[in-house]
Image (cartoon, helix red, strand yellow):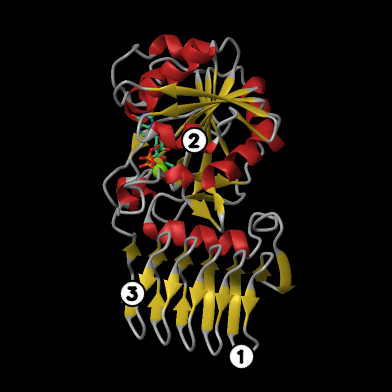
Amino acid sequence: MKAVVLVGGEGTRLRPLTFRTPKPLLTIANQPFLERQLSWMGRHGVTEVVLSLGYLPDAFVAHFPDGEFEGIRLRYAVEPEPLGTAGAVRFAADLAGVDERFFVCNGDVLTTLDLGALAAFHDEREAMATIHLVRVADPSAFGVVPTFDDGEVKAFVEKPPPGQAPTDWINAGTYVLEPSVLDRIPADINSSIERETFPRMLDQRGQLYAMQSDGYWLDIGTPDKYLAAHADVISGALGLPPVAGAVEEEPGIWLEPGAVVDPSTRLVPPVLVGRDAAIGPGAWVSGTSIGAGCTVGYGARVARSVLHDGAVVGRAADVADCVLGRDVEVPEAAVLRDALRVCEPA
Ligand code: GDD
Ligand code: MG
């Protein structure tokens, strides 16, 4: 099957990390998020992916210069201006010449969903479109989707005010669409699949369905969730090793080749130490993902954080709930809390 992956958004909630790197190319546990998503699709039989691009499109082309990843053919649909989630799907599907049912995925969703099961659910109901649903504690930040017992969608309410959601089952951002859905999306103008296409399909019964699942699911698009995704991936919540080549030294402690951890350093799981990174002596690192070539100095403390490649935590510094972008340096003895830091452009 073909898939359209929506990766055109600006990732505003992850600024400044996303000023120079689009959200899907930010790493999760030292692997670009989009690579993880493509591997997931490949495992479920997707052979061709159209990347629906708008923001920083050249970064994607540079990242996959051969137009291929793990045997999946990649095509690039670059919007002249943002077309919204529906307009983007139409634009990308037209470019790829989609002529049978296809998947659409939001480009920031980390999940173990069985895509084959979603397609089978769709086929059994002869649906025009089928939405994957998951249950969350606070549905107000999502598309809320009550259904009948057979999965037919009753309503689609995008981001209701807090406390007013009719259910806690939400749109998980993966769909199966028939090509006929494309005829309902106007070409070349901005429109929203959540606010326009799906609600309008409810004018007639028997068209829009949704499948609930209880597997792992997370939208990585906010700082809290971006940090949480690392802890989940490193602790094995997705049922996979965190990153190819890493070795589990102790339960929840993973080291990549060339990583050097001083014996006097304490690591509290989940921790991933990247290639050629150097930690300690006397450091204390808990719940943290450390990129290639990073340094954590003597006696430093790092908790619930993410260090992108080349970041440096100075001696006796104290860092918690932070993302340190590539090559960011935290000075000796500095205290840093709840921060997203990037290097200023040279
Ligand atoms: N190509 C393109 N063009 N992509 C876009 C555009 C656009 O104009 N606008 C947004 N996107 C992409 C984003 O890059 C992202 O991958 C995806 O569409 C969803 O946008 P978000 O900005 O992340 O939306 P959200 O997280 O607030 O809400 C969406 O996802 C939730 C699940 O995580 C909605 O689909 C909700 O209904 C859903 O519950
Ligand atoms: Mg999102």
| Residue beneath disc 2 | 62
First in sequence: mark 2 or mark 3?
A: 2
Residue 61 as seen in the image, left or right of residue 31: left
| Residue beneath disc 1 | 264
**Front residue (pair 62, 337):** 62
Q: Are marks 1 and 2 in contact (CB under 8 Å)?
A: no
- Point out the residue furthest to the front here: 346
Q: Amino acid at mark 2?
A: Ala
Q: Residue at x 47, y 44 (%)?
A: 25
* Quadrant placement of the N terminus: top right
- Residue 101 on image: x %, y %: 59, 17
**Front residue (pair 168, 306):** 306
First in sequence: mark 3 or mark 1?
A: 1
- Residue 118 on image: x %, y %: 63, 31
- Point out the residue furthest to the left here: 161
* Quadrant of the image where one finds ligand 2: top left
Q: Residue at x 65, y 40 (%)?
A: 39
| Residue beneath disc 3 | 337
| For discs 1 and 2, the disc positioned in front in the rendered view | 2
| Residue density around tag 2, few if under 14, some if 14–19, many if 20 or more, within 10 Å | few
SS assignment at label 1: loop
- Residue 217 on image: x %, y %: 55, 49
SS assignment at label 2: helix
